[in-house]
Structure formats: C-alpha cells, structure tokens
Amino acid sequence: MFTIGRNTDYASRIVLHLACLEPGARVTAADIASRRLIPSAFIRRIVSRLSAVGVLATVRGSGGGIALARPAAQITLREVVEAFEGPLSLNVCVASPAVCPLAVTCPVQQAWVGATQHLAAFLTGVTFGDLAREIRDPQSVP
Amino acid sequence: MFTIGRNTDYASRIVLHLACLEPGARVTAADIASRRLIPSAFIRRIVSRLSAVGVLATVRGSGGGIALARPAAQITLREVVEAFEGPLSLNVCVASPAVCPLAVTCPVQQAWVGATQHLAAFLTGVTFGDLAREIRDPQSVP
DNA sequence: CGTAATGTTACCAGAATAGTAATCTTTCTC
DNA sequence: GAGAAAGATTACTATTCTGGTAACATTACG
C-alpha cells in the first residue's frame, strides 16, 4: 500500500477548513489544529510549508492567523499533494529515468509515466472550491 | 514523492522478461536477475510472492525455473503492484475509513477514493501482453 | 547421493515517518 | 516600551519501513 503521508492529509484538512469559511476569513493555526484533530506542534510546519508554496497567506503576531492565499476554487488537490510529496511520480524512473539503466526502451516505465499523468490530471481537476461545496450541499455530488 | 517500492519495480521487470519469451518458456530466477539487474539474493522473495499470488508458476529442483502462470495478456500491471503494495489506496482513510474520525462526511476522503479508483482502472488496463508487444514492435504505440 | 534450483526465515543498516519540543521573530495591544 | 500572541525555524527522538544480504530448508532430477 503506497499512500500519501500524514503531512499531506493534514494539509488537505487545513485547506478544506479554510475553504469552508467566509472567503478571506483568517483563523489561528491552533484553532484549526484543535477542530481538525491535528497535533498542534505539528501544524506549524505544515502551515509554514503551505504558505511558502503560495496556498496560504499568513499574518504573524498577535491577532494574526492564516487564510487562503487565493479563492478556494483556484486551489487544487494536486497543489497541496505536491507541496509535501514532491512532483508526482509513481515510480522513481518517472522522475529520473537515468536511475534505471533499462529505462530508455522500457515499456513498463512508459506505463508508469502514463499512470502518473492520469493521476495528476485527476488531482488537478479537484479544487477545494468543489470540496467545500460538497460539505455545504452534499447531494450536489451523487 | 510517493512511489511504488523497489520490490514492485523488480517484479514488473521479471514478468515483462517472461512475457517477451515464447509462451510457456521457463528460465531460472538467477538468469533473469543477471539480465535485468536485480540483486540475486533479492529475487527469491519476489518470485516466491509472485507465484503465491498466481502470476508465476515455479518448478523446484534441478532443471526447474519460473514461467508465467497465465498468458501475458491476462496479467495486469495492477495485479503485480497489489501483490507487493497491497490493495491500492492512496490514503489510509481509503482502505480503512475508521482511522479518520472525520471520514464519514469528509469530501477529501471521497476525492481520494475517486483518485484511487482511477489509478486502479488505469493499471488494470495495462497487461504484460501489451507491454511485451511494445518491445517487439515499438512503433505500435506512438 | 549430489547438485541445481526454488522456498523460507532471520538479520542488518540506513532512511523515512510521525511526532515533540525548544527557541526565534514578528506584531498587536495596552 | 513591555508583554503577550501568533507564526517561523530548527533540532531531536522513537518507531517503522525499506532495500538488501545471508543462511538454511526443501524439492526434484539424474
């Protein structure tokens, strides 16, 4: 079973949480941590990374907090995943074909490239605008 | 970057190698190991697992070796992957929703289920018959 | 029986993962 | 300006996973 890491999972919860609030709403990381069951000492790094990548906008200091850097509809699940997992690549030979001496003419490598592209396309098609809408209006996605 | 493990990669090389031979051909694991650059002390476990799963048929003893248990066209890449990675599940909450207390109504979980299904469908559509044909006749797949 | 082959198990070193903790920096409020 | 609130950064740890090695057991042919 090869899966995304906990970081990525937590990150998507954070973005989803913000996507469900009023546009531009700002809350503290600690608040999200408690509501979304994320270890509070952990969320720091996650938020920091998401802001470095341009998904979140943070404000330091008293009264500060975090908000989406863009409308939720413009944030894709793929972006969040790649912020923590790196560029999508289902096999090492996809990201760096040089590591496999057989790769040049290897049809399995081609298959992995195709699978990676399919997955990437799917994740690009999922925005947090969509996901937030599902919560507000569950029957919209049968 | 979340990728398949080396086991899975090696396994696909083994199956591909056999798929390129005459149907029913039997060769030794050590032979494949040397030709396909797989650590020879490693290939035992891989072959063993592939035969337990019904992809390979092995014959012990002197003069023995390994062969495909079925025609290559009936062996999918998904089968080989799942033999080593377990059931496809891009997030833990896909395989076991119980681990996430939020999962019941979590739209991100739904997204992961969808992504997993897409990937599974793609990998099911890739057979080693196809892959072997690409080697013999490279221009068949532009 | 000896040899050639797979099957199985145990083991190990290094890396990754999940999580904790401490400290630094910024900025608001009083 | 002091203090507190908040994010930023870094270091650390314990556990698990991974890739790989090695040894031994089992099977079967001749």
Image (cartoon, coloured by chain):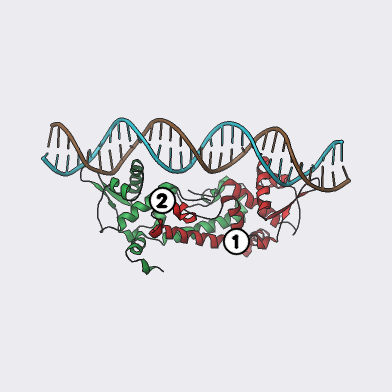
Chain colours: A green, B red, C cyan, D brown
Foreground label between 2 and 1? 2
Location of the C terminus of chain A (image quadrant): bottom left
B119 sits to left or right of A79: right
Specify whether residue A139 is in view. Answer: yes
Disc 2 target residue? A9
Residue A72, given in percent of the width and then of the height, sits at 32, 59
Labels 2 and 1 positioned on one and the same chain: no
Who's the residue at 61% across and 57% down the image? B79
Residue A74, given in percent of the width and then of the height, sits at 34, 59
Q: Is residue B114 above or below residue A49?
A: below
In-front residue for pair A98/B123 = B123
Residue A128, given in percent of the width and then of the height, sits at 35, 59
Q: Amino acid at mark 1?
A: Val
In the picture, the disc for residue B126 is 1
Host chain of mark 2 = A
Q: CA distance from mark 2 to mark 1?
A: 29 Å
A93 sits to left or right of A20: right
Q: Is residue A137 above or below residue D27?
A: below
- Callout 2 environment at 10 Å: few (<14), some (14 to 19), or many (20+)? some
- Callout 1 environment at 10 Å: few (<14), some (14 to 19), or many (20+)? many
Instruction: Please tell me whether mark 1 sits on a helix, a strand or a loop.
Output: loop
